[in-house]
Image (cartoon, rainbow, N blue to C red):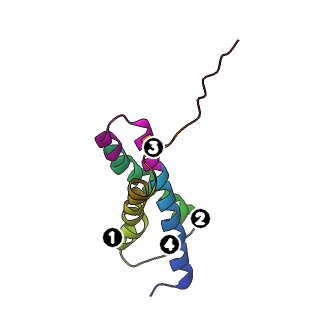
Amino acid sequence: MVSVASLVGFLVIAGLHTLIATVATRFFRVRMKTQWGSAIFALLLTPLVLVVSTLFLSGMLGLGGNLGDRNTALFVVVLLPLALGYSIDVFWLPSPEEIDLPDTTRDRR
């Protein structure tokens, strides 16, 4: 049986991981010149960051708890936030090309 404290811990980890996945996806979309490059980097490097973050948050800080199955925990704290973060960036945030940035080049004398 999952306790309320472990459920809240997993929700905190999943929320933080969704934020990390969204920011990482946006970073790769802004930096990469091709769509496939940003998708591949987001889908290969972001889970690595999420696993390291899970080890830190659940191991050192003691958040979360025992869900009884490693696959369930992996789904809740890595795969679900990765899918949510990627879809938030792709479907709800404006495309990087649509954002007008101020001109930062100035006449430096």
Name above or below for residue 104 compared with residue 18: above
- Frontmost of labels 4 and 2 is 4
User: Of label 4 and label 3, which has the lower sequence position?
Assistant: 4
- Give the side of residue 71 with respect to residue 59, left or right: left
- Frontmost of labels 3 and 2 is 3
- Frontmost of labels 1 and 3 is 3
Q: Amino acid at mark 4?
A: Phe
Q: Which mark is residue 61?
A: 2
Q: Position of residue 9 (x, y in %)?
A: 54, 73
Res 64 visible? no
Res 43 visible? yes
Magenta highlight range: 24-39
User: Of label 3 and label 2, which has the lower sequence position?
Assistant: 2
Q: Amino acid at mark 3?
A: Glu
Quadrant of the image containing the N terminus = bottom left
User: What residue is disc 4 on?
Assistant: 10
Q: Quadrant location of residue 98?
A: top left
Q: Residue at x 55, y 77 (%)?
A: 8
Specify the farthest residue to the top: 109
Q: Name the magenta segment's main secondary structure.
A: helix
Depth check: give the residue in front, 84 or 64.
84
Magenta includes 11?
A: no
Q: Residue at x 38, y 66 (%)?
A: 80
User: What residue is disc 3 on?
Assistant: 98
Depth check: give the residue in front, 79 or 86.
86
Q: How far separated are the C-alphas under marks 1 and 4?
A: 14 Å
Q: Amino acid at mark 2?
A: Leu
